[in-house]
Amino acid sequence: MGIDVGERRAAGPTEVASGRYVLGREIGRGGTARVFLARDRLLRREVAVKVFRARAEDPEELRVQEAETKLIASLNHAALTTLHDAGIDVTDPERPQVYLVMEHVRGGDLRERLRRGPLCPLQVAWLGTDLGGGLAYLHQAGFAHRDIKPANVLLDAADAGEERIRGKLADFGISSLIGSVRAGDALTGTAAYLSPEQAEGEDAGPESDVYSLGLVLLEALTGAVAFPGDVTASAMARLDRDPVVPASVPEGLATILRGMTARDRRARMPLDEAVPAFLDWIVDDRVRRREDQGQGSESARIAAARRYDVLDTAPEDAFDEVTELVRRTLHVPVAIVAVVDEERAYFKSRRGVGLPQLPRAVTSEFAESEGLGTWNIPDVLAVPSLRSHPFVAGEPHVRSALAAPLLTHDGHSIGRILACDTAPRTFDAEDVATLEGFSRIVMRELELRLASRRALFRS
């Protein structure tokens, strides 16, 4: 059967490879192909199927399509999309059609993610580490990507609440062997992310990819395209000036991005320097966070808690569902989602306790000594500062507790989700992982609400 999905009706999915792959909704498109979410019936997994828009009218067109297939098949790196399968439909022998079956990266692409707002510096540093590593691998294999842009960056964890975002490079349709593109033929790619030498029609090599990646990471930090405008204005602007790196960008990251986007390709920071620099910045950032957990960072933590606008609102069904799941999953009588401000722990949801909030001071000594990690307390009576806690000395007479922090994407703990038992109990590693998973669900809900409010105010 044919697989020309560009002409398919909305009546139902199209089957590929004799029915092994069933195409569903479109999840991406470009100048030469469309990408569909699909179901692999044989292995029972979701995949992405890329189908070239036009059937190959001549041998040269088919050769280009086959070249992309062979290129992707030859690559094996965590930051590059993986090719599972490929085929050529020959229903019409005169016009064969190539399709690729690739891994489905669930987080969508960076272009979609940036519509909800920019990423935090730590997320951008992780993206720089991933994408820079994948790009270096591609260059070592002898290829230049030549079309790095947000739409070609796929995210394993695109949610704003995920600190460790993971990126993968996709779409190698115009990749070329390094040095094989003739001068004058190199103006290929997306105007907003072209390097200066590409804009001048020179050969696009590894340094050109470095420049384009620098622009993409800068946009991820600021939420704005560095060189906006029509094709000509955008392409020519970079010949006159370097992209603006705002003063708000942390200096360490700003230095890397300036190095990657130097106009002179010979002065550009190579990837074997940029990737370690991103990793060094990530390590330094973690050290800074630990040092900042003292009194000096409390105002920033309070501001982080208040930006979600939940401290003075009534408890909500969404959080009640989470605490009920905590009770059932961990088999505890008490479950609480608590957001902490200057003076109180305010319960956004509670199961098994009556009070809607407690003074922050009742656990301040324990909190200061235990830091930001998950608290696992087999017997609260063994902790002197907790013996007088209202829920320990009185109803419901808590004797053991597990408490995971509610961590924002910029490293602040705005509260905790707690699971408490009325008997001494040792919570195992699986219990800890379960509660930390519920903590991330709560933060995703808060981040989605915040993103929705921002989108509403912008519209």
Image (spheres, rainbow, N blue to C red):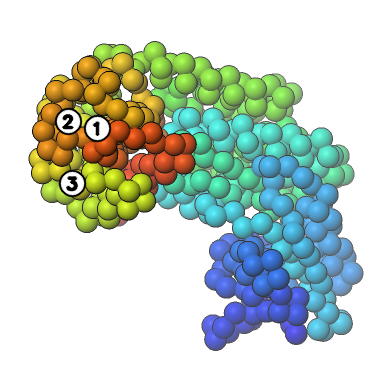
- Determine the secondary structure under disc 3: loop
Residue shown at 69% from the left, 46% from the top: 80
Does residue 139 appear to the left or right of 232 in the view shown? right
Residue shown at 77% from the left, 45% from the top: 76
Residue type for callout 1: Arg
440 or 323: nearer the viewer: 323
Mark 1 or 3 closer to N-term? 3
Residue 127 vertical position relative to residue 17 in the rendered view, above or below: above
Question: Residues at badges 3 and 2 in contact (C-beta under 8 Å)?
Answer: no
- Gap between marks 1 and 2 measured at Cα: 7 Å
- Gap between marks 1 and 3 measured at Cα: 14 Å
Residue type for callout 2: Val
Q: Position of residue 211 (x, y in %)?
A: 65, 34
- Gap between marks 3 and 2 measured at Cα: 13 Å
Residue highlighted by disc 2: 392
Question: Residues at badges 1 and 2 in contact (C-beta under 8 Å)?
Answer: yes
Mark 3 or 2 closer to N-term? 3
345 or 294: nearer the viewer: 345
Residue highlighted by disc 1: 399
Residue 2 vertical position relative to residue 448 in the rendered view, above or below: below
- Determine the secondary structure under disc 1: loop
Q: Position of residue 154 (x, y in %)?
A: 58, 49
Location of residue 362 (image quadrant): top left
Give the residue at the far right of this rendering: 59
Q: How many marks?
A: 3
Residue highlighted by disc 3: 352
Q: Residues within 10 Å of mark 1 (few under 14, many from 20)?
A: many
Quarter that holds the C terminus? bottom left
318 or 58: nearer the viewer: 318
